[in-house]
Amino acid sequence: MNQFLIKSFTIVLSIIFLASCGGDKKEEEFKFYTLKEAGAQQLELTVEASGTVEAISSIEIKSKASGQVLFLGAEIGDFVEKGIVLARIDQRTPTNTLAQANADLEVAKVRLTNAKNQFNRSKRLHDEGNISDKAFEDVQEASSSAQAQLVRAEVFLENARIALDDTSVRSPIAGTVISRLAEVGQVITSPTSAVGGGTLLMEMADLNKVRVRALIDEIDIGKISIGQEATLKVSAYRDKRFTGVVSKIEPMSQVDQNVTTFPVLIDIENKDNLLLIGMNTDVEIEILNEEVALALPAGSLRTRKDIASVAPLLGITKKDLNNFLTEKVAGENFNTFIVLKQTKKGAIPAWIKVGKTDLNHVEVKSGIDQKEIVYVLPSEGLIKYQQKFSERVKGRFG
């Protein structure tokens, strides 16, 4: 609407200047309005915002093993397949522990065999009455202890195998290394008791599909819905546009310098890996793209409050205007407004109901027909300014 008013004002000034400088040409009449015909119109409206590229899924690569880092298999930016060895930690201690666990298991097996043989002999003697109950109970206890020692030895052996396996860190996904926090030769200490513990070595992400976190003004957030298409541009590729889809609207607002925004997440296919984590983006979310059968310029709409200031300029008497405004109309200033129609008898006010808008034009639901003509006028303040400017120009060049 503002662009339309500026253009109209520029045309008016040009007419005034040409008329004033025309010498013997007849000065043209000062006009502060334009005439527009109701008709079909393509309505297009987008919400603009800024955003940042994020990974949809990122994984921390940790080592549960402690020791010296002997090998790192990827640099930042490298793409690695699932299962590839990313790091190796010194295996000497885990290897020795595994050997000891194997030996302990063999000893436990021998002890259990001896304990079982002793139990069988003692049971026979006890049944014959040749040993006391206390002696037989001691043999039973020794057999149970040997069985428990075997179980512990098996557990220790399994833990030793896991610890040795942990010295080789493999990629859990196919993705790109986005950070590396360890170097070859570094000695790491990884707590084994904490859930999710371990020393962070790298971070990986799948960059074939990324996400942009855009901050949408609270005024516009009600116009955004999941599934809407969004267009994005980044400084690195100014001539290229990326297309995404709104996947989530976060419910928690962010306030910065008294401006309230809501994060909106937009998922984007990134097969060429052109969009990198942390890139700043310009986001446009299309909220309206529709051709309507009947529309008018938004600048033609008036309200009950401001119609009185412009009606006299078009020859509408105060009495006629008051008679028109006597009627109470539902939806005033919401979806019902006043327009000034051009007729053979002059300008007349009329109520119309409106629908969608792209801020420059509005869809007309009722109250006006195809090809009817309406007056488009600027604000009262701009009209007065134009009139005063016209008088100054005439005074200088007239």
Image (cartoon, rainbow, N blue to C red):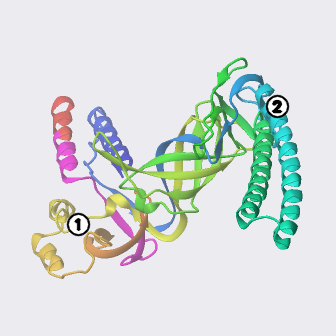
Amino acid at circle 2: Thr
Which of labels 2 and 1 is toward the front? 2
Q: Residue at x 19, y 60 (%)?
A: 310
The residue stretch that appears in magenta: 363-388
**Residue 394 in the image: above or below residue 288:** above
Q: Position of residue 16 (x, y in %)?
A: 28, 39
Q: Residue at x 67, y 19 (%)?
A: 186
Please indicate whether residue 114 sits to the left or right of residue 140 in the image: right
Please indicate whether residue 280 sits to the left or right of residue 156 in the image: left
Please indicate whether residue 103 sits to the left or right of residue 357 in the image: right
Please indicate whether residue 121 sits to the left or right of residue 180 in the image: right
Quick one: 138 or 349, which is closer to the camera?
138
Quick one: 16 or 195, which is closer to the camera?
195
Quick one: 102 or 347, which is closer to the camera?
102
Residue 328 on the magenta segment: no
Q: Residue at x 51, y 69 (%)?
A: 292
Which residue is at the far left? 319
Q: Position of residue 304 (x, y in %)?
A: 19, 69
| 3D distance between C-alphas at marks 2 and 1 | 86 Å
Q: Position of residue 107 (x, y in %)?
A: 85, 43
- In what element is the residue under mark 1? loop
Among the 4 quarters of the image, the one containing residue 92: top right
Q: According to the image, label 2 marks what residue?
A: 95
Q: What is the crowding at mark 2: few (fewer than 14 residues within 10 Å), some, or many (at least 20)?
A: some
Q: What quarter of the picture does the C terminus occupy?
A: top left
Mark count: 2
Amino acid at circle 1: Thr
N-term mark: 2 or 1: 2
Which residue is at the far top? 185
Q: Residue at x 54, y 39 (%)?
A: 281
- In what element is the residue under mark 2? helix
Instruction: Give the numbered dot on residue 303.
Output: 1
